[in-house]
Amino acid sequence: MRVFESGVLSRESGVGSHESGPDSYRDGSRESGVSGRNQLLFFNNLALLISYRLVLCKAAKAFKLPSYPIITTSKSFFRMFAVTILGNNSAVPAFNRHPTSQVVTLDGSNYLVDCGEGTQIQMINYKIRRSKISHVFISHLHGDHYFGLIGLINSFSLLRHQPELHVFGPAPLKEIIELQLKVADTKLCYPLHIHHITEPAILIDDEKLTVKCFRTNHRIECYGFSFQEKKSLRKLLPEKAIAFEIPAVFYDRLKAGEDYTRKDGTLIKNESVTVAATPGKKYAFCADTKYDESIIPHIAGADMIYHETTYLDNLRERAESRFHSTSKQAAELAKKAGVKKLLIGHFSSKYDTLEEFETEAREVFENSELALEGVCYEV
């Protein structure tokens, strides 16, 4: 499902949200005490959005385009796990497409995956808050995947960025960045930590998510990244807890999975007063790679993956020789890995239109979509 996020343009709606994204709803009249006039203005604007949505639905129907809701009131809207595509082209910018870059968003934090040239402009275009970026993951050292990084690092300092920044990438990246800073006599105003990737490993493991890297089969050392959302606490059934006379001070421990023993020695099993939380979701970025089933264990069962499709399937031999993949190969891998959704990107600049990529992929794996720049895809 694609939704609004931080002003990102949604292909379904053609409308961008306010720069502050979902927070703009939470920080409205209820919390900020705005006047009744402003409340009325808010609901008038909401009505206009809904009216605009109806017009778009009619247009979509007339032109046989897909139609999706632009507004969601689900709780997940405020704790979004999503991917925003900033660049989906390979090698060079072409046809208004940009080199690889995307932002993974979870619970208000932004994780940048690859940083091709033009990434900062794309962040500005799609209202991605640079200040929310704490980690950057560089898959490999072909220029279209990291030439925008030194500019971003420098901009952070010029903007008086204070929080530390962690960058993960192949070992030579540290030397490259340090040389660029040295020859420019640049002194950063914030802590920069560049971490070497040399083998499959856990890169982040905190209360929100686990990030791992895995090798892909490319011409030079290259890594994919998987983002696994941490499983939530169990959901408490208050009426059951009250019926079993469990004190409220114990509720947090029930959510954590503990059983409760009453004063008379009776054991109340956790399953009697809670239900299992929704399993954490998983997203995998498969980077540049030729068709290689060895990555399946790292992406198996993922809710969504991004896999490169540099060429259409009639150029399968060229893809093989250049360590890239075709549309149908990406779909074949997604199908074998049992993933729920496939995003395809890294399109060769020889193609000025992309519809055939999606058509070919869907012949093999139905739930395939083009990874379009400026679109936010919910995991």
Image (cartoon, rainbow, N blue to C red):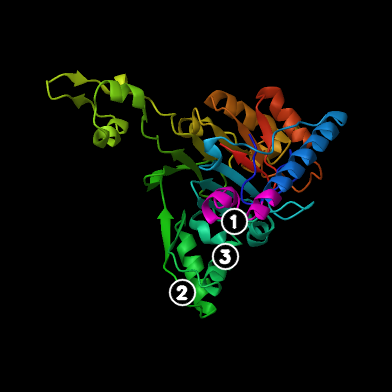
In the rendered image, the residue lying farthest to the left is 264
C-alpha span from label 1 to label 3: 36 Å
Other residues around mark 2 within 10 Å, as few (<14) / some (14–19) / many (≥20): some
Q: Earlier in the sequence, mark 1 or mark 3?
A: 1
Q: Is residue 238 left or right of residue 153?
A: left
The amino acid type found where label 1 is placed reads Val
Residue 261, quarter of picture: top left
Looking at the rendered structure, the secondary structure element under dot 2 is loop
Residue linked to disc 2? 189
Identify the mark at residue 34; answer none if there is no mark.
1
User: Which dot, 2 or 3, sits closer to the camera?
Assistant: 2
Check whether the beta carbons of the residues at disc 2 and disc 3 lie within 8 A of each other: no
Q: Earlier in the sequence, mark 2 or mark 3?
A: 3
Identify the mark at residue 152; answer none if there is no mark.
3
Looking at the rendered structure, the secondary structure element under dot 1 is loop
Question: Image point 67% across, 57% down: which residue?
Answer: 122
Q: Earlier in the sequence, mark 2 or mark 1?
A: 1
Say which quadrant the N terminus sits in. top right
Can residue 168 be seen here? The reply is yes
C-alpha span from label 2 to label 3: 13 Å
**Residue 18 picture location, percent across and down:** 66, 53
Other residues around mark 1 within 10 Å, as few (<14) / some (14–19) / many (≥20): few
Over which residues does the magenta segment extend? 18-41
Say which quadrant the C terminus sits in. top right
Q: Decide: is 267 above or below 6.
A: above
